[in-house]
Image (cartoon, grey):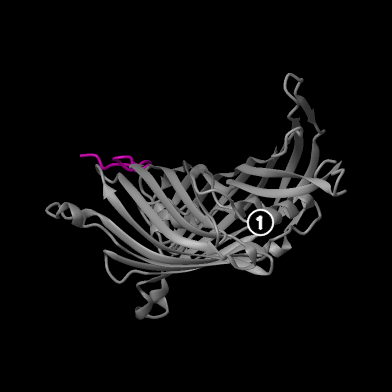
Amino acid sequence: MKPTIRHRFVGAALVILCGIQGATAGSGGSAYSLLGLGDIRYTPGARSEGMGYAGLALLSSQYIDGMSPATWSRLDRVRLEGSAFYEGFNSTDGTTSRYLARMDFHGALLAIPVSRPSGIVVVAGFTPFSEVNYDTYTSSVVPSQNVDPVTGAHDSLGYQTHQVGTGGITRGQLGLSWAPSQEISFGATFNYLFGTIDHVASQITQTSGTIGGTFTDRTTLSGVNFTAGMVITGLDRISEAFRPFSLGFMITTRTNLHTAMETTYDFAPPPDAVPVRDTSAQTFGRIAVPFSFGFGIGYRPSERWTVAADYGAQPWAGADFNGISPFGIRNSHRFGIGAERAGSTELTARSFDRFAYRLGVTYSATYYALNGQQINEWGITGGVALPLTGESRVNIAAIYGGRGTTAGSLVKDKIFRLTVSLHISDVLPWFVQTEEE
């Protein structure tokens, strides 16, 4: 019988509740990514990641924030950012542990300023929206049809189920910013979400005379949404004490992801027999992803110091997968706070003083909830920006944290993430007329 979406959610819960096996390192990630659409990625950029993922209220002439288009209005040169991402999970169920890790491309964004006086900047690129990446085993025993002639008891058949998930959803975005004055900036993007998610389950028999099999559940997804944002910096109009502060806000609309699912069955035959493969017909459906929003505050007491704090939320309880409320999903929210000490621009400054340093903390109530347990995540972040030539830089952001719990037979993850981002800047501003001598 072809498995339904509900069957996959229940299977996901069983895998997580049964724990993990093995103690070797390998390619993969957290078992929690089996649920829903996988781990939802929040990718503002290496600068914000080093500052506790905060920065919705920070205008910058150097960095492209992938989540808040209103922050682009101060960009005055063509800029290209590309990132690589390493993620490692040390997962345990309280008895055994396993380390899984992977490295991947983390997106690229291109910013082209069109009008500096009006703050019009066009940005296009790709960033991850979600990632599915797990590799886990469960063991089971079922009674067979064979009966012991002496005791009359049924023999038992032991087997392992090896479940692997890969893929995810990518966000392609095209947007622009606009600043009608120095005190306020607006921005909006069109986002196209697309990707493929594979769930593979292999039954490995442990009894002679029996055969196993594998089924691969492949789902392709696509849909569109829109993001809008605003940053306000002219708070000194209210009071001079508010001059160092800025406020930011962003919202992303609800998304209808159109899905096409196909299941392939591969059965392992006895030796010298012909392998058996069967493929189901494609079925089409819809996944409704709820809207999300966030707001932030920035504080810049001096030219070199910046402090920021953000809050964001997404009501996943309102999601539906083909009309079914998804299993193991709840409303999510996150909070982050961080600080940056910018590098010196003095020509005589020492090399270490020319680096920018960042530090922050972040807390997230993820959209996972299983066995009566809410899966929360915390992290300590840090980062550094290394100047190259001109305004080009290498940005490094690292986070160490954890999520989950071993209570209720669940899994606890210790997490290490590292983002390395190359920021390349054009030497001269575009679309700016130079004065004739």
Is residue 33 among the parts visible in the rendering? yes
* Residue ID at (74%, 42%): 259
Quarter of the rendering occupied by the N terminus: top right
Residue 435 is a magenta residue: yes
**Magenta segment boundaries in residue numbering:** 425-437
- The majority secondary structure of the magenta stretch comes to loop
In x, y percent, where is residue 432?
34, 43
Question: Which residue position holds label 1?
Answer: 18
Residue farthest toward the front in the current orientation of the protein = 150
Quarter of the rendering occupied by the C terminus: top left
* Residue ID at (76%, 20%): 273
Residue farthest toward the left in the current orientation of the protein = 348
* Position of residue 433 in the picture relative to residue 437 (left or right): right
Above-or-below relation of 370 to 418: below
Above-or-below relation of 249 to 189: below
At label 1, the amino acid type is Cys
Residue 63 is a magenta residue: no
In x, y percent, where is residue 112?
43, 43
Q: Nearer the viewer, residue 113 or 302?
A: 302
* Position of residue 178 in the picture relative to residue 319 (left or right): left
Above-or-below relation of 61 to 315: above
Query: How many marks are shown on the rendered structure?
Result: 1
In x, y percent, where is residue 302?
27, 69
Is residue 345 among the parts visible in the rendering? no
Quarter where residue 164 is shown: top right
Above-or-below relation of 103 to 380: above
What element does badge 1 sit on? Answer: helix
CA neighbours of label 1 inside 10 A, class few (<14), some (14 to 19), many (20+): some
